[in-house]
Amino acid sequence: MRGPDLVLGIESSCDETAAAVVRDGTEVLSNIIHSQLLLHQRFGGVVPEIASRSHTQRILGIVQHALREAAVTPEQLTAVAVTNRPGMIGCLLVGATAAKALSWLFDLPLVGVDHVQAHIHAAFMTRPDMPLPAVTLVASGGHTALYLVHAPGRTERIGSTRDDAAGEAFDKGAAILGLTYPGGPAIEAAAIDGDPTAVQLPRPLLHNELDFSFSGVKTALLYHLRGSGLERPMPSLSAAQVADLAASYQAAIVDCLVVKMRRAAERHHAASLAIGGGVARNALLRAAIAADPVLGALELVFPPLAICSDNAAMVAGLGTEQLRRGAVDDLHLPVTATARR
């Protein structure tokens, strides 16, 4: 009789070096993440060369840590799953090379996983019987898109951002306000004591299909502070002013996300709604979804915070699903910067 699937997941698409072991697609035995935040913070964003170098230095130690915490040896593994798209090419190459070496050394099947699809699949790891069809929002620093989910591994993109991703907009807004990187957590913290109605910021594309646009929110914040021609120097802001601006900015982004999710759920007769990506950790977003009369009536699947941000458990989870379907790759598995539709 076949034993449980034990899949090692490896994630290195951006600035987290991660490895995890997942049993039977849902039980997370380990989920080790090394953040490069301190390496990139002074640059206000991820520097690809620095990220790739850090992955190279840490990837094997992270894998060993994941195996040790899961109390699993390489010989006990069923397969190795690795993010091979989308992401920064140099970063992806580090993870893919490590996964190929492990696959060859221990004669394990190799499974290439789409990073965005793994974020979607995190909902099935949280709720394997999630009612379908489901609308899923994936929102992070690099991605903001809506997907219609028909079954595990079967998704259709129904909306995406035309410019900045939501997480990118948070980063840029935080930079304008003099807050730290990454911007999402910094703005969320600053907004706690702020008034979200203090400044009226636009909600772009609110009445237009299912696509998003966030660059106008960022520009409006900048113009509010410096004038439409940037004729004024950046003002010195009090803590109270920063709090109000942060709260207003966060509210504008969350409103855009919620309106588009509501429209998607109504249009596609969704039975449930799920969220994934780093922005899915935002407390205001989760509360606004639950409070919405349409979305709140659906089955809401909010994955634990640990598998919302970039992580390897979601990679192992989707890798298990693909393995069971026979979607196995060979050692020629390529890496690509773009996601599949």
Image: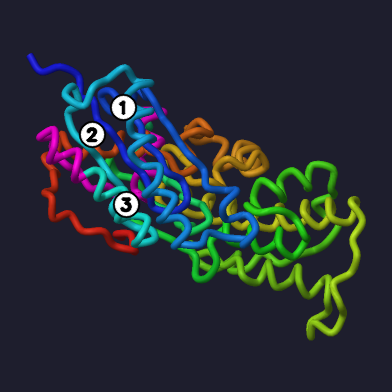
Whole-angstrom CA distance, mark 1 to mark 3, is: 21 Å
Q: Which residues are magenta?
A: 100-129
- Residue found farthest to the left: 1
Residue drawn at x 54%, y 35% as measured from the top left: 297
Q: Nearer the viewer, mark 2 or mark 3?
A: 3
Q: Quadrant of residue 62?
A: top left
The answer to whether residue 81 is above or below residue 263 is above
Residue positioned most to the front:
57
Which secondary structure dominates the residues rendered in magenta?
helix
Classify mark 1: residues with Cα within 10 Å, few (<14), some (14-19) or many (20+): many
User: On screen, 264 above or below 74?
Assistant: below
Which corner quadrant of the image does residue 201 belong to?
A: bottom right
Q: Nearer the viewer, mark 1 or mark 3?
A: 3
Label 2 and label 1: CA atoms lie apart by 8 Å
Which residue lies under the disc numbered 2? 320
Q: Percent x, y for residue 212? A: 53, 64
Between the residue at mark 2 and the residue at mark 3, the CA separation in whole angstroms equals: 21 Å
The residue at which mark 3 appears reads as: 94
Image height of 130 relative to 15, above or below: above
Colour pattern: rainbow
Residue 254 in magenta stretch: no
Label 1: which residue?
A: 22
Left or right: 31 in relation to 252:
left
User: Is residue 232 in view?
Assistant: yes
Residues under numbered marks 2 and 1 in contact, where contact means CB atoms less than 8 Å apart: yes
Residue type marked 2: Thr
Q: Is residue 22 left or right of residue 102?
A: right
